[in-house]
Image (spheres, rainbow, N blue to C red):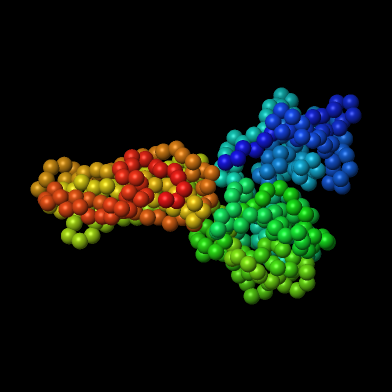
Amino acid sequence: MKALKSDILWHNSTTSETQLWFMDHFRIASRATVVGEDGSPIFVGPPWSIVGASDFNGDGNADILWHNSTSHETQIWFMNNFKIAARPTVVAEDGSPIFVGPPWCIAGAGVFQPNLDLTILAQSAWRYCGKCSAMFFDGYPTKGACLSGGGHQAAGLSFLLPHSRPETPVAQESWRFCHKCNELFFDGYPDKGHCPVGSGHEAAGFNFVLPHDLGGRPVAQANWRYCGKCHAMFFDGFPTKGNCPAGGGHVAAGFNFVLPHDLHNSFVFTTPLKSGGLAALGGWVTLTIQSDGAVRWQGHAHDSGADGYDFSISVIVQTPFGHAVAVAHSGQVGGFFTPGSRDHDWDETYGGQAADFFFEFAFAEFHTNLQYSSDFGSVLTGLVDWAIKFTAGSVAGPVWNSVL
């Protein structure tokens, strides 16, 4: 995962100018005065003061936190580079403005309750517009510009779009946020399509890399398409095709995108153990992959027959994007005529690198392989080549690698 570089925020107590130094390691790459929504420099001084900076809406841009020492108002400047995109007052749980002053003071700003956005290189708050059928970013107080009039109107699912990762045969890069209309558009051509505000779209923020042609999944919706007329992403699952700035409805072209939505904090893969034939070995295995990269590997084996078994179970969860998590466990269960417990349980947790590609497990396939030998005759059942290919023999923990 590529680390994001920090920049330096300055404020002049005499002129009330706010300035950003965009850094390249310890060298200044460029510097810019913060400007308002209209593009003109903005000067703010007492009783206002800057008390912090953080990415409050998850768009990849650091935002500026202000506090008023007289009115006790707290305000956030949502930034698009050095330009203010919006500046709402902080509100309480009930939606009303909240004013806090001495003896309280703001001591910092940061991510104290980690969310999926920071963990998996993906941005939330992308929504379907029920008026024009386009995909738009719903993370700002203003809702962009909809061709059907006014701002966009969110409906349906809340999408989580991956960004800042390599393009693959099943994921296309160069999808961008248009800061004029808030829509998602394809920025891979010299022509920037048609923006509802006029002229072409203008890119800002992340470079989104979107999965396609993988089929619909429980937490990923298919039928999102590129419009060949306006270059925006639109939902093609209804008979009507929305409203296109180029005229008429949108016209689908290219890939069928499958976009993740409403992801939880974990993916759980589980299956029963089935020995087959006359063998009496059963049970279950479960692999849980957490958004923070942790992997929990659980299982239960049970012998319901006369003879005992030595067994080895191998599991791989494989994504179509070039990543896999593989685990294995070996154990023994006793039968009616052999010593040992009929039951064998395990519950193991590992840290790992799965956080960097967590969303990919929405599209993953789950494979298992059970090998066992009986105390009576030592007949080995299973696909040895499978275990060698996916788990390199007897593996006690997870294997992090590209697909083998």
Quadrant containing the N terminus is top right
Identify the residue shown where x is 53% and y is 47%: 357
Identify the residue shown where x is 77% and y is 31%: 28
Q: Position of residue 52 (x, y in %)?
A: 72, 32
Q: Position of residue 79 (x, y in %)?
A: 76, 42
Question: Would residue 308 be found to the left or right of residue 178 on screen?
Answer: left
In this rendered view, identify the residue nearer to me: 337 or 231. Answer: 231
Residue 165 visible, this angle: yes
Identify the residue shown where x is 68% and y is 48%: 206
Task: Name the residue furthest bottom.
Answer: 239
Image quarter for residue 27?
A: top right
Task: Name the residue furthest left.
Answer: 337
Question: Would residue 370 be found to the left or right of residue 268 on screen?
Answer: left
Image quarter for residue 181?
A: bottom right
Question: Would residue 44 be found to the left or right of residue 203 on screen?
Answer: right
Task: Name the residue furthest top.
Answer: 103
In this rendered view, identify the residue nearer to me: 225 or 170. Answer: 170
Image quarter for residue 118?
A: top right
Q: Position of residue 280 (x, y in %)?
A: 19, 55
Residue 153 visible, this angle: no
For residue 281, above or below residue 30 = below
Question: Would residue 369 be found to the left or right of residue 259 on screen?
Answer: left
Identify the residue shown where x is 32% and y is 49%: 388
